[in-house]
Image (cartoon, rainbow, N blue to C red):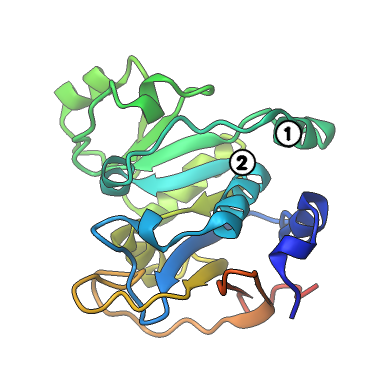
Amino acid sequence: MRSAAEVSDGELAAWYGRADRPWLRANFVASADGAVAVGGMSTGLSGAQDRRLLKLLRMLCDGLLVGANTLRVEQYRPLTLDADRRRWREERGLAAYPRLVVVSGSLDLDPDLPALAQAPVRPLVLTSPDAPTARRDRLAGVADVVAAPDLRAGLALLRTRGLDQLLCEGGPSLLGSLTADDLVDELCLTVSPLLAGAGAGRITAGAPHPPRTLAHVHTHTDPEGFLYLRHTRPEAPTS
């Protein structure tokens, strides 16, 4: 088992890579006893190498999928990349920045949120066909607002816009909906060396659904004791 701190960004990127077909990767952090947050936010569970991996997985994706509540609670900043990561993307024919995609049924979003108003690429907000028209119009100044009847149709719509490689960062309700519809191709889970205690939920929430079998791809760690797990659909390549 190798340490993330021992490998370069290039090697770490090769470990994860981009799929050769439309792909939804989820990236979450949880405590050793299964909590998704400390004090209501995931940042209390993270460490230096976990934050490095988060930035690297963002570099690899076409679109970053996040629920509206997570965007607000976690106080998302604009989705930017440093010069080296932008160069990596451009050398491979990708846009300099991935696109932020916010999932919101109610469109209860402030257009002045930095993640929206200061984004380097115009964000996209995925909503339901019956979302309030006034809220759609209010957000239209900072984002493209598109409607789909369900998440499966929504992901298909995103892919017509060139967003084939999607990275979901939460929250638990969004992940629960995606797994319920069997739309998750990969789970990257960081296990924090922390006992958070009772109170916080798991990385997934919502209605029960049949279990989804995954295949182990790789495991690595870091000097701070974090464990990094990667699993994909069983038919996916494991190298």
- Frontmost residue, 235 versus 111: 111
Residue 99 vertical position relative to residue 36 in the rendered view, above or below: above
Q: Residues within 10 Å of mark 1 (few under 14, many from 20)?
A: some
Nearest the viewer among 31 and 90 is: 31
Q: Is residue 87 left or right of residue 24?
A: right
Kind of residue at badge 2: Asp
Q: 72 left or right of 56?
A: left
Contact (Cβ within 8 Å) of mark 2 with mark 1:
yes
Report whether 214 appears left or right of 169.
right
The answer to which quarter of the image holds residue 145 is: top left
Indicate which disc residue 62 carries: 2
Does residue 37 show up?
yes
Closer to us: 53 or 105: 53
- Across and down, in percent, residue 196 comes to 30, 74
Q: Return the x and y of residue 229 as percentages of the image width and height.
A: 59, 74
Question: Disc 2 or 1, which lies upstream in sequence?
Answer: 2
Image quadrant where residue 172 sits: bottom left
Q: Please, which residue is most extreme toward the front here? A: 223
| Residue 23 visible to an observer of this rendering | no
Percent x, y for residue 231? 60, 75
Instruction: State the quadrant of the C terminus.
Output: bottom right
Q: Residue at x 36, y 71 (%)?
A: 180
Give the residue pinned by disc 1. 94
Looking at the rendered structure, the secondary structure element under dot 1 is loop
Q: Mark 1 is on which residue type?
A: Leu
From mark 2 to mark 1, how far is it between C-alphas? 8 Å
